[in-house]
Amino acid sequence: MKGQKKKARAVLCLSVFVVMTGVALAYGQSTGFTDNIYPVGKLKPTDSVPKLKVADVAPDFILPAVEGGTISLSQYKGKKNVVISFVPAAWTPVCSDQWPGYNISKKLFDKHDAVLIGITVDNIPTLYSWTKQMCNPNEKLWFPVLSDFYPHGAVAFRYGVLRSDGVSERALFVINKKGIITYIDVHDINQRPLLEAIAKALEEANRQ
Amino acid sequence: MKKKSSSVVFFLFIVVAAFLFLCASVGTAVKSVFADSAGLSTIELPIPESEGEKEYLGLTGNGNFKIGQIKARVLIIEVFSFYCPHCQRTAAQINDLYQMIEKRADLKGKIKMIGIGAKNSRYEVDSYRERYLVPFPLFPDQSIEITEKLGVKGTPTFIGVKVDGKGNQEQFYFGEGGFQDNQKFLTEIIRLSGL
């Protein structure tokens, strides 16, 4: 009994040490985010059933934007190629280091006559605080960030990227000016897609 | 009772130890507790294709090179990421640091700089260079093998290494999270390296 108690105490202490040091040792993101990121650990790479495929008509949607007002997919039809970037959740490791890269890549999207739309299932106040961390003070992300919060994850669900725990996949959809899906990448949630994959997908979208 | 209180003390000791370890891990401008010269000596980088970069680093030919082969006395390594907002915000400041070194006759040629793009592809590193007009050589580290060997957990991280151009290197500085004042940083690098 005494030995068991001792063992339990040792396990408890070791657990505390491992958890606390694990926070520091997990390969990190920008140090600017270090204190505010919730460590999610390694997740199941994908956890949803695809509903759409390349050559399908992209389902239209209308969602509230962090900057105010709403944005619909159809407003870009006939005018711009659209890249939709679903990321799982605000204040999580990989997501926090994905859109800041897109924020310095406007030229790439302009070059391919494209707009970028960021979507998460978080609410507007959360997205407001989180996206402010991604750029210089008094600056904003150049692309709209939309909240798919209520009804919860409805757009992610229609696009087949809502995971069983209520967050979305880390997914990219490219939609050409005709409103047709030309590229889908439901990425491993633990990894960030490469920028060149978007560049290549946009080249393809312009060819179709 | 006495036994119980000693358990509590022991438990608290573990918590405090873990906390101190955590603080040390995310602290700024501290000497390394992670990487050592042995880790550095196993790092190989591709010789740049650009003649200007080859000349800056004192390298010739193709293939790979080791950090200690860079023709300098001190190398400053910035581990950055295309996706890191902190790196983006300080990119111009780090370019200024490079210019500051190049303009000083007593430092030009003796202190050199490179950047390692943690988890970044060649395309992403090139995009970062183009976006911020980075004047020193940048190398992608998509597999994060180099970043891990350097013991880097977050970006940006700055590492100071003494080199001799013959393949030998010794790390003398490790600072995570950047710095505010280039002049102070440079003075510290000169002091710690004994340059």
Image (tube, grey):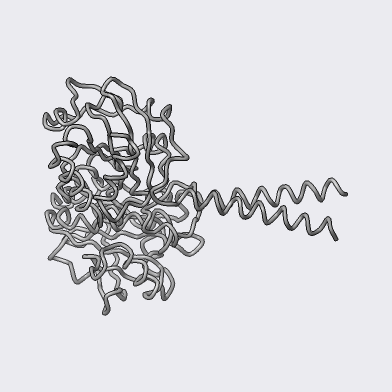
Q: Residue at x 63, y 53 (%)?
A: A16
Instruction: Give the image quarter of residue B70.
Output: top left
Q: Is residue A43 visible?
A: no
Q: Nearer the viewer, residue A51 or B84?
A: B84
Q: Looking at the image, which is closer to me, A94 or B87?
A: B87
Tag count: 0
Return the x and y of residue A72 as percentages of the image width and height. Answer: 25, 72
Residue farthest along the bottom direction in this orientation: A69
Residue A201 in view: yes
Which quadrant of the structure image shows residue A135? bottom left
Figure check: A65 above or below A133: below
Farthest-out residue, right: A1
Q: Name the residue rendered at 45%, 51% in the picture.
A: B26
Picture quarter containing residue B71?
A: top left
Task: Measuring from the top left, give residue A65's x and y in whole percent.
Answer: 29, 74
Q: Is residue B9 above or below residue A158?
A: above
Image height check: is A17 above or below B102?
below
Residue at the image point whose x is 37% and y is 65% from the top? A120
Q: Nearer the viewer, residue A76 or B76?
A: B76
Expressed as whole percent of the image width and height from the top left, the position of residue A42 reads 50, 49
Horizontal and vertical percent position of residue A75: 19, 71
